[in-house]
Image (cartoon, rainbow, N blue to C red):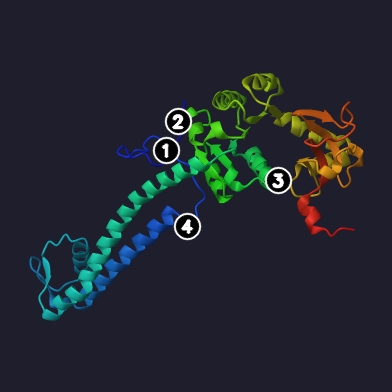
Amino acid sequence: MARPKLKLTPSDKPWAGQAQVHLPSRGNSAAMELTRRVALSLLLLLIITVVVYVDRAAYRDVYGGGEITFLDALYYATVTMTTTGYGDIVPVAEHARFINIVVITPIRVAFLILVVGTTVEVLANEGRRALLDAQWRKSLRHHTVVIGYGTMGQSAAATLLANGVPPEKIVVIDANPQAVATANRQNLAAFEGDATSRELLHRAELPKAREVIVTVNSDDTTILTVLTVRQLNRTAHVVASVRDSENRPLLRQSGADAVVTSSDAVGRLMGLSSISPHMGAVIEDLLTPSDGLEIAQRMITPEEEGLTPLEITGEKVLAIIRNKTMRRFFDPGAESLQLGDEIVVIRKSATKAHREPAA
């Protein structure tokens, strides 16, 4: 079984062997920072080279003799800035030695600080990342874990965000580093690795999760992932997508609370759009967040107690959830609403409603 790719696994660190979360970045990338420091080092090298070459008459090549060339000046700058100091090219004039003291030596010190600082910062960042990882995991509770961040996973996360779920309450797991980077750009924490790994799921605090959404690419991986998830968390609401409808019973037996057959759903939508373009447009509208109609679930208000589903204004009630049991609006016992009920409704999108003034 493939193991998660571990970014920070030095053998002498206490967090060795543990996959750490990729938190959304707020600063420059490591590549940009390294490029900046290399460019600064080359600039310091160039400054020393120009100073020596301009004043080349004040320097002597003890072994080679002759006039100091630009290559000689670059060579002197290199061995001097790196403190190698072979001693074959030396300043002989007093003013050249003075320039070495007040100009070249500070540059050499600055280069050493740059090199040492880079090394120390790398080590400090490793420790800081491990500390942030521990703090992040300690504070994570009742979150949603999205396993698989392809098209379906991204759509699921977008729907959660559109319905008020905070970004810090969503954790992504995907084996593709590009998917992890995409999640970070959307301000979501993410892990890179195999979703069937118990260690990785523990690192994502899955045992404390409230919901788990599984949208991986193959049905066999989905079934194994759901089995592992259910072993670690008996109470979370698990939603899984499956490509082949014949695997729905297996996923149900594996512990999935809801199973969505992606190919059947797309095919049915295409069929409805072919039979009735308007019917297909309505369903697509319901599935599109923040545009036109939306489907939502909410608690009833005290003012709505005792009303029938048809008496709810501004929304169309589809179902009532009472004592964790769903009752459709036409089922017996759904004639009137009671405090504590939740209702599933179709309503105007909150974003659209905000944009359009009331009539």
Q: CA distance from mark 3 to mark 4?
A: 29 Å
Q: Nearer the viewer, residue 268 or 26?
A: 26
- Mark 3 vs mark 4, foreground winner is 3
Question: 206 left or right of 337?
Answer: left
Residue 261 placement (x, y as % from top left): 71, 28
| Mark 4: few/some/many CA within 10 Å (<14, 14-19, 20+) | few
Q: Which residue is mark 1?
A: 6
Residue 40 placement (x, y as % from top left): 34, 65
Residue farthest to the bottom? 95
Mark 2 or 4, nearer chain start: 2
Residue 81 placement (x, y as % from top left): 22, 64
Q: Which residue is mark 3?
A: 163
Q: Nearer the viewer, residue 50 or 98?
A: 98
Q: Nearer the viewer, residue 191 or 152?
A: 191
| Mark 2: few/some/many CA within 10 Å (<14, 14-19, 20+) | some
Name which quarter of the figure residue 130 lies in: top left
Q: What label sits on residue 14 in the rendered view? A: none
Count of number-bearing discs: 4
The residue sitting at 19% across, 78% down in the picture is: 55
Q: Circles 2 and 1: CB distance less than 8 Å?
A: yes
The residue under label 3 is which amino acid type?
Asn
Q: Which residue is mark 2?
A: 3
Q: Which residue is mark 4?
A: 27
Question: 129 left or right of 13?
Answer: right
Mark 3 or 2, nearer chain start: 2
Q: CA distance from mark 2 to mark 4?
A: 29 Å
The residue sitting at 82% across, 58% down in the picture is: 356
